[in-house]
Image (cartoon, rainbow, N blue to C red):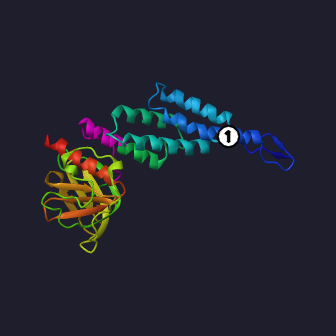
Amino acid sequence: MGLCSYCGQPAGFLRTQHLECRARYERAMSMMPSFFAKFLDSQVPAGRFSELLQGAAKAAYVPPEDLAALSVAEIGRIIASLFDEHPPAVGEVQRVAELIEQLGDGVSDNPSLNEQLAKAVVVAGLYEGHLPDAVSVAGPMPIDLGHDESIIWIFNHVLSYRGGAAGRDGSNGGGLGNGMDGTYRSPRMLNGIKAPANAAEEQAEGDLVITSRNIYFLLSHEDGHRIPINRIQFLHAFADGIRVSNSEKKSRVFLLDDPCFALNVIGRISKLTDS
């Protein structure tokens, strides 16, 4: 006699599940996303929310790995929504961080979710008026940071090349423009247009390091490039990267995984360090 894959009790001859157990599981998996959607606006403490969620999952035979996967997906949606219309608020980000911690293994140790959260911490801090300290670097860095200069973010595996002229008015060529005014741009504003193609001009791959003073493009075979943020005139985001211009004729494209985040971070740093 087989055992039910949900409740673990005898399921009958040649059976692996009770239909009612399967229905209970599927009902819980379809309902639990709505719990997360209401979390930010509720007054329920993160610890209590975690207890209720895990209790409901256990009662519906939802295994820990399925609950963790669902939690990662739903919290990822919550974090993404924080960027929709305005910069994430520090209080909102802290509340999400508490929930991630309370949900424990499988959620709190998820690299992708932690990266999303770290980006929210960075943007929330910058738009609250201070330079955040969300990035820690293991081992030596191949750059000498200046006095009071700190690393804000690092993009790995970035492709870069000369981007051509930006135009006398800083025209963006269809990209999200000009980030150097410090105005927040939502990822929803990106229109799908890709960065200007000019890959034959000094193409290179490396890591892009954004600090409180500079942008460093680090290459494995040479020292790389340094662009002082206070010398950037035009900054535009495209679907696949950003274009940084320090004059009408000189610009550089960086193809990276979150161009809107890069634009907001660089533009906001410029405003904070100018004030």
Q: Which residues are magenta?
A: 120-139
Name the foreground residue: 174 vs 229. 174
Q: Quadrant of residue 160?
A: bottom left
* Count of marks placed on residues: 1
Name the foreground residue: 173 vs 260. 173
Q: Kindly identify the residue that appears in the image at 35 percent across and 54 percent down.
A: 258
Q: Kindly identify the residue that appears in the image at 49 percent across and 44 percent down.
A: 109
Where is 183 relative to 166, above or below?
A: above
Residue type at numbered disc 1? Tyr
The answer to whether residue 258 is visible is: yes
Is 121 in the magenta? yes
Is 223 in the magenta? no
Q: Quadrant of residue 240?
A: bottom left
The answer to whether residue 142 is visible is: no
Q: Residue furthest bottom?
A: 200
| Left or right of 110, for residue 264 | left
Where is 183 relative to 157, above or below?
A: above
Q: Kindly identify the residue that appears in the image at 79 percent across and 39 percent down.
A: 9
Q: Tell me residue 178's x, y (percent).
A: 21, 52
The residue singled out by tag 1 in the image is 25
Q: Residues within 10 Å of mark 1 (few under 14, many from 20)?
A: many
Q: Kindly identify the residue that appears in the image at 31 percent across and 42 percent down.
A: 123
Q: Tell me residue 16's x, y (percent).
A: 79, 48
| Left or right of 219, for residue 103 | right
| Left or right of 105, for residue 214 | left
Q: In which quadrant of the rendered image does the C terminus lie?
A: top left
Q: Tell me residue 17's x, y (percent).
A: 77, 45
Q: Residue furthest top?
A: 43
Q: Tell me residue 250's x, y (percent).
A: 16, 64
Judging from the image, what secondary structure is the residue with disc 1 in?
helix
Q: Quadrant of residue 238?
A: bottom left
